[in-house]
Image (spheres, rainbow, N blue to C red):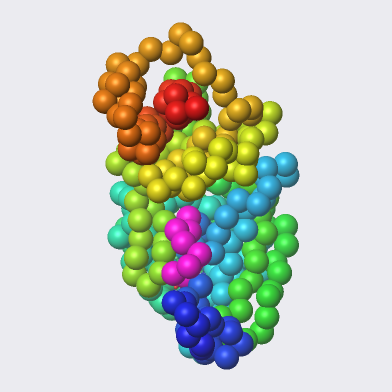
Amino acid sequence: MRLSGKKMILNLKELKPADVQNYLQHAIAPRPICFASTIDKAGNINLSPFSFFNLFSSNPPIVIFSPARRVRDNTTKHTLQNVEEVREVVINIVDYDMVQQTSLSSCEFPKGTNEFIKAGFTAEKATMITPPMVKESKIKLECKVIEIKPLGTGGGAGNLVICEVLCMHIAESILDENNKIDQTKLHHVARLGGDWYCKVDETNLFKVVKPNMQLGIGIDALPESIRNSTVLSGNHLGQLANVHEMPFVDPTFNDDKLKNIIQYYSINPKEMDLELQRYAKELLDEGKVNEAWQILLADY
Ligand SMILES: Cc1cc2nc3c(=O)[nH]c(=O)nc-3n(C[C@H](O)[C@H](O)[C@H](O)COP(=O)(O)O)c2cc1C
């Protein structure tokens, strides 16, 4: 470890695996949770959560999760052993209503323990594969395991379980009128570092408008006084620079607050500049990019 200026620089090769895991899990966060239901050749069912998990392709539809070798004693997880025997898995998506029971299921119960029973979840028959689904989960993915890729042989080494999604089950309660998933209705939980989790709901969801198909002008194309503003943040500049061409003054734009600022600060152009930027900032925070541009253009 090296302290340089105001930051710490870590050479991961010099750290213990447990510390590497700790730093990475706090940094790569939040991570969605794959609640994997698997079965062994003898028919024993297993249910365990994995946050080394994500979507990697939609055509073909591929998700990957990673049951790692235990850092403590380099043993492998029952989930990995099961998918090596029976190459099928139901990935149940975890939401806030399930989080405590999901965590309970991650206890290191002996092999052969059915965590549906231990954690109090209801097993529901899947339609295309053998392992059961978690009835309480609002989205379940029936998957075929197409490849298992070990990433190492030491403690902490991940094993990529590459899965093709064959079928999705989605609760009606989280659908909108077009039968699409309503993001505000599914309260996902995600794993961060240590014991930290986060919950997605209406209080913390926000939208970022997708960059224009016609390319944003870019921050380098913003007028210098905007680019070097002490009022506008990087987020505000990002919003302004996402327009596809430098806007013009709109003669029909009529705004009382703008008129007041111009009148009040006419003898102090520097203050006027700042006041206009403060007003533009308010508008940008409300997502009103065109209006914010008109306010800033009033300065030229
Ligand atoms: C929310 C959550 C996420 C987890 N993510 C992972 C993970 O990505 N990889 C991993 O190896 N273990 C992870 N664990 C730990 C496993 O769930 C735990 O080792 C479990 O006992 C494995 O069960 P199994 O041996 O029955 O497969 C996680 C635990 C929790 C609670």
Which residue is more in the foreground, 246 or 266?
266
Asked whether residue 30 is in view, the answer is yes
Identify the residue at horizontal 55%, vertical 59% (top origin): 53
Q: Give percent across and percent down for residue 108.
A: 41, 77
Which residue is more in the foreground, 44 or 24?
24
Looking at the image, residue 254 sits to the left or right of residue 290; the answer is left
Q: Give percent across and percent down for residue 141.
A: 55, 46
As drawn, the residue found furthest toward the front would be 267
Looking at the image, residue 15 sits to the left or right of residue 110; the answer is right
Identify the residue at horizontal 33%, vertical 37% (top origin): 271
Q: Give percent across and percent down for residue 50.
A: 49, 64
Q: Give percent across and percent down for residue 230.
A: 40, 48
Identify the residue at horizontal 45%, vertical 41% (top origin): 236
User: For residue 222, what is the image quadrant?
Assistant: top right
As drawn, the residue found furthest toward the top would be 252
Q: Is residue 29 magenta?
A: yes
Q: Is residue 155 above or below residue 123?
A: below
Q: How many tags in the picture?
A: 0
Q: Is residue 73 above or below residue 160?
A: below
Looking at the image, residue 283 sits to the left or right of residue 14; the answer is left
Q: Which residues are magenta?
A: 25-32
Identify the residue at horizontal 47%, vertical 33% (top origin): 181
Asked whether residue 168 is in view, the answer is no
Q: Is residue 134 magenta?
A: no
